Image (tube, grey):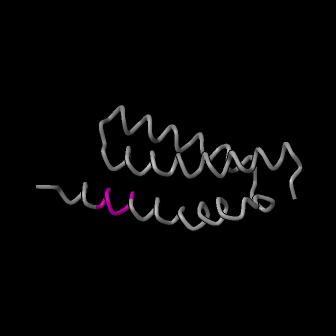
Amino acid sequence: MIAMPEIIGYIAATLTTASFLPQAILTIKTRDTESLSLSMYSIFTLGVLCWLVYGVYISDTAIIFANAITLVLAASILSFKIYNTVCKKS
């Protein structure tokens, strides 16, 4: 049986990951990153990677799944931002 703290962890992981989806979908569709901060997405993506490593280290499935998905989405947005910044795309 799953304990209440684990249930809360899975709910939190689902909600925080799902909250990131609209921005990721919009950026991937439009490839428009002009209004996004390069430093914010760089720091955020690194932080998500650290959470993923932490989740693996403590063997916490909720942390691992949520941050693995968020890392893919954040890295995609960051890649578009870096590309648009380097290539000066408007």
Picture quadrant where residue 83 is located: top right
Q: Is residue 10 magenta?
A: yes
Q: Is residue 65 above or below residue 46?
A: below
5 on left or right of 2: right
Please tell me which residue is depicted at 52% across the width and 44% down the height of the picture. Answer: 48
Please tell me which residue is depicted at 44% across the width and 34% down the height of the picture. Answer: 53
Q: Is residue 89 magenta?
A: no
58 on left or right of 50: left
Give the magenta range. Answer: 8-13
37 on left or right of 64: right
Q: Position of residue 31 (x, y in %)?
A: 72, 59
Where is the N terminus found, in terms of image quarters? bottom left
Q: Position of residue 50 (x, y in %)?
A: 50, 37
Please tell me which residue is depicted at 74% across the width and 46% down the height of the picture. Answer: 39
Q: Position of residue 78 (x, y in %)?
A: 68, 47
* Residue situated in front as seen by the camera: 86 or 45: 86
For this orientation, the residue located farthest to the left is: 1
Please tell me which residue is depicted at 46% across the width and 50% down the height of the picture. Answer: 69
Q: Is residue 33 above or below residue 87?
A: below
Where is the C terminus found, in terms of image quarters? bottom right
Total numbered labels placed on residues in the image:
0
- Magenta segment main secondary structure: helix
82 on left or right of 23: right
Picture quadrant where residue 15 is located: bottom left
For this orientation, the residue located farthest to the top is: 57
